[in-house]
Image (spheres, coloured by chain):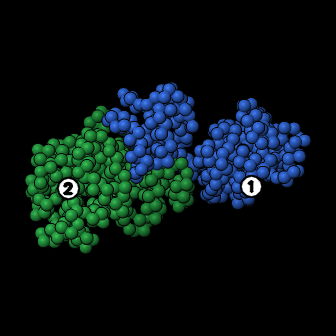
Chain colours: A green, B blue
Amino acid sequence: MGNEDNTAAGAKSGSMRVAVVGLGSMGMGAATSCVAAGLTTYGIDPRDSACEAFVEAGGAGAASDGRDFAGDLDAVILLTVNAAQCRDALFGEKGLAAHLKAGTPVMVSATISVADAKAIAAELEAAGLTMLDAPVSGGAARAAAGEMTVMAAGPAAVFDQLQPVLDAVAGKVYRISEKIGDGATVKIIHQLLAGVHIAAGAEAMALAAKANIPLETMYDVVTNAAGNSWMFENRMRHVVDGDYTPTSMVDIFVKDLGLVTETGLSMKFPLPLATTAYSMFATASNAGYGQWDDSAVIKVFPGIDLPDSGKH
Amino acid sequence: MGNEDNTAAGAKSGSMRVAVVGLGSMGMGAATSCVAAGLTTYGIDPRDSACEAFVEAGGAGAASDGRDFAGDLDAVILLTVNAAQCRDALFGEKGLAAHLKAGTPVMVSATISVADAKAIAAELEAAGLTMLDAPVSGGAARAAAGEMTVMAAGPAAVFDQLQPVLDAVAGKVYRISEKIGDGATVKIIHQLLAGVHIAAGAEAMALAAKANIPLETMYDVVTNAAGNSWMFENRMRHVVDGDYTPTSMVDIFVKDLGLVTETGLSMKFPLPLATTAYSMFATASNAGYGQWDDSAVIKVFPGIDLPDSGKH
């Protein structure tokens, strides 16, 4: 990469300079969408392979340490796995926050708790930076197409600062409110549904297996009737195929339904289905399926014969 | 109605003669779909108003007692609420079974247990009649359009006998197997998903209300993201509108998730989410919401402000 290249690219397009932190399935999609939209885009990820792939895909540069180019950036998007990684990227040993220009907006798009969203916003403010509480949904395919759903909260001025980035990565942007934390809340409630739907799909398919109903038939009936869900249609296909190659892992829902459960506890609000689904994912993880596709939550039901391609 | 009309109609079209038992939202749709397909169609329902409405809609006749025309019938469809009503229609005081021609096929489309499906099949066989175990899904609108989803099990010969009826009422027919009871099982597993999805939608919207997230926004986000389900999109609209006019009632899911729970018990199979959802619907029913729209399961969450149109 190097500064000469960076300057050249910036000069050519006169475009915004943005860094995407976390080049996983969602982050890589968001980063390449920024490239496609003509933004000068950097990637930050500890994995050399991800950095190389992004530079090949048109990134202006990519590294595990973003401090070299932090001062040139007009915006940062965080698409890390959790709040600890967000904090590390901003305030850790190689943290960007101390090196960004004053007033640079940081779009926090990881799924994190309301308390973490508020705490990170306060730390960014103390560093002279602004934040959009902006979780995303949609899966890897929609991220790659620049069509993520963004559920965002924050001051109108920060939405305006980030408009070119939102245009690049999002198919739909919800402005929930001006209140940091509301984006996190909406995402957590969304994950409640996503997680319960995967676990319910697994429970239904497990019962079908127990009752000797062909799983292909059961899948076909449900996906053509009122019992269908986005997650049933997407994830129970993996169960029918016996292919647990992860699109999203069991441990992601241990984390996300954990956030849901903590949210209920912090509000003293009962969440009978979400806490039950959390236990199912936590059981699957402890049984050794944490890194398998999240549809492997069906493994909590013993004593049934399921299709098995051997892939996971 | 009268025998002259019946004979005339049969002679005119040379068509099959079919009776639909239970002129509720699904039964009326199936009956008018049979009329639209040119079948000579009778209705059987204890309510005069339903019978009158069906005759106005082109029915060849309708009454609370079908024994007068039973001997002319080529097929019977049962779309009653439960197994007790099926039994009463076939084997009760005004029961049809003793008056049908030998070999007449009976399509049992109510949602009933596997044990009831098998028992009714045995009783029909003893009476010289055949049965298709053929639950349906799709809601009132698709029933009215002749586009129900039928999940059926039974001998191939009975499928053949009922083909004109299936063509009239169904958009899609699944031939699960030849084994009576498999249709009931598939429907029960479908209802597991439908019921859990409504209860999960209610839990999510209740948490949104508790967290002061506008419900319209929450609904909009979910229906455009991976957390969506057919039931969320259909039923949580009622919560956003505060309109609990029943399309399907809470007590229907007390019954259907009760069947799911009994199925789990009979197979000694754990159903953590379904049994939790059953408790939510049973709680709502005991709190006085049994006859409200099934989205009123959200009333099990106290201490939140929900939209209220006053309708139920």
Residue that badge 1 annotates: B164
> Left or right of A96: which side holds A232?
right
Disc 1: host chain: B
- Where the N terminus of chain A falls, by quadrant? bottom left
* Amino acid type, residue under disc 1 in the picture: Pro
Nearest to viewer (mark 2 / mark 1) = 2
Rendering coords of residue A58 (x, y %): 25, 70
- Residue at image mark 2: A75
Q: Nearer the viewer, residue B119 or B51?
A: B51
Residue under the point 34% across and 37% down: B213
User: Where residue B14 sits: x, y (%)?
Assistant: 85, 53
Residue B61 at what x, y percent from top left? 80, 39
Q: Is residue B19 above or below residue A104?
A: above
Residue kind at label 2, given as amino acid type: Ala
Q: Is residue A122 left or right of residue A285?
A: left
Vertical placement of residue B82 versus A68, above or below: above
Residues at marks 2 and 1 on the same chain: no
